[in-house]
Image: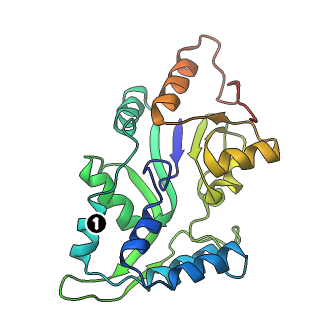
Amino acid sequence: MQVFCDFDGTISKEDVTDLVLERFALPEWHEIEDQWIDGKITAAQCMRRQVRLIEATREELDAFLDTIEIDSAFVAFKEFCERTGLSLIIVSDGVDHFISRVLARHGLSDIQIIANRLVGGSDAGKAAFDLDFPFMSAACAGSGVCKCDLVKPSGDQIYVGDGRSDFCVSHEPMLVFAKAKLADYCHAQRIPFIPYDSFADIQASVAGILSSPSRQPFALPVAKSA
């Protein structure tokens, strides 16, 4: 059994990439964001252009990342997954270094992370940053990380998300926990999902499913469309 989890706005309380850009990037990053929202560029093109606008050393970047907060219930949820034999994997269209740095500060360095790869930067000066896309796939229309290609659906899988990068994978036959934009999307598309506010809600739901004598693969729960 596997739990695939988005990071930005799901584990972290806010979108970490946006926070980094607000703090360190040249103001043109907002215009690039608008181009992506308007469908003029892909998500991967948007991310790469924005990351290239970051003006910071690695040291400055890491010091800022150390201030990022995560869902207060996520540590307990990770421990719950370990106790119950659930494999926990982060699948994000965000930036690997941002995610790993935030998790490390909370003692969570051993979680597998699938994300876009940050390259460049130094502590000697404000060197240029860039992105590599090791998980890009032709199966996805412009995403840096193709979640549909990486998450192989089955009834015994859980997906947790909140945003646009989670839309395509929410169509797969698995148990979906959704909030914010993803919940709105699932509702509009009539995709069954379970709403949540925090990982405490998710843990309680999954614990109930696992303890049910009649449990079948995770297609069973009373997932909602509202």
Q: Residue furthest left?
A: 124
Query: Tag 1: residue type?
Result: Phe
Element carrying mark 1: helix
Q: How many labels does the image show?
A: 1
Res. 45 image quadrant = bottom right
| Percent of width and height locating residue 171 | 74, 48
The residue that mark 1 highlights is 64
- Residue 21 vertical position relative to residue 99 in the rendered view, above or below: below
- Residue 215 vertical position relative to residue 47 in the rendered view, above or below: above
* Residue 171 seen in the figure: no
Res. 146 image quadrant = bottom right
Residue at 45% across, 67% down: 17
Q: In which quarter of the image is the C terminus?
A: top right
Residue at 69% across, 36% down: 193
On screen, residue 140 versus residue 119, left or right, reads right
Viewer-closest of 154 and 95: 95
| Percent of width and height locating residue 221 | 67, 25
Decide: few, some or many residues near mark 1? Use Cα within 10 Å; few <14, some 14-19, many ≥20.
some
| Percent of width and height locating residue 41 | 67, 81
* Residue 174 seen in the figure: yes
On screen, residue 200 versus residue 212, left or right, reads left
Q: Residue furthest top?
A: 213
| Percent of width and height locating residue 185 | 73, 50
